[in-house]
Image: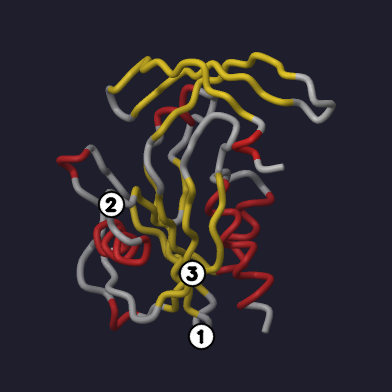
Amino acid sequence: MSVKDRIRVRETRLLSDNWYVLRTTTFDWKRRDGTWQIQSREHYDRGNGAVLLPYNLANRTVLLVRQFRYPAFINGHDDLLIEAAAGLLDDAEPEVRIRAEVEEELGYRLGAVRKVFEAFMSPGSVTEILHFFIAEYDATMRIGAGGGHPDEGEDIEVLELPIDQALAMIADGRIKDAKTIMLLQHLALRVASD
């Protein structure tokens, strides 16, 4: 049985359309035992996104960003967050959008990029699918300082770190961003270990 055969939407209401869209939906859900149950869920729609981890195997380094994230701060993270370059698709194809984000945030124009997977990051409340990419980089690809767009509130520091140091930063808690952890572990398991 398809999921769409197990759900009957009763009502969807808009709660907020400020930064992104927050809705609440009441629906009937057909449980595994065949009974129907009324449920209600809020869901945040911020659009889909893409993330990319540039790596240099010759130097065994990666490029990351460090920036302020208010939701992390109010949940007790009293530091800037270290992340892979990422952004929303804004109706562009994932590869096109992530190339632009890397130029804006890191200051690099990359050659070939490789999509490695897609994932829901918080499927209990957020609709976003994130497209994950990796790409090789070297110093000749640098076209600017990076740092993002100040008019969009971005104040991004570019970090070039040894791969082993970045992996250690996961273990000691300095890197807490899920998308970054996933890409660093993918790199360690599938690329840098060869």
Q: Earlier in the sequence, mark 3 or mark 2?
A: 2
Image marks 3 and 1: residues in contact by CB distance under 8 Å: no
The front one of 110 and 168 is 110
Q: Type of residue at label 1? A: Ala
**Going 24% across and 58% down the picture, which residue do you hit?**
104
Question: Separation of disc 3 and disc 2 at Cα?
Answer: 18 Å
Left or right of 137? Residue 55 is right
Badge 3 crowding class, 10 Å Cα cut-off, few under 14, some 14 to 19, many 20 or more, is some
Residue 66 image position (x, y, % from top left): 40, 48
In the structure shown, which secondary structural element does the residue marked by tag 2 occupy? loop
The residue that label 3 is drawn on is: 115
Q: Which residue is mark 2?
A: 91
Residue depicted at 72% across the width and 19% down the height: 36
Which amino acid does the dot numbered 2 rest on?
Asp
Tell me if mark 2 has few (under 14), some (14-19) or many (20+) residues whose alpha carbon lies within 10 angstroms of its own.
few
Q: CA distance from mark 3 to mark 1?
A: 21 Å
Q: Which residue is mark 1?
A: 58
Which residue is painted at 39% across and 53% down in the image? 86
In the image, residue 129 above or below residue 5: below
Q: Which is nearer the N-term, disc 3 or disc 1?
A: 1
In the depicted structure, whether residue 171 falls above or below residue 111: above
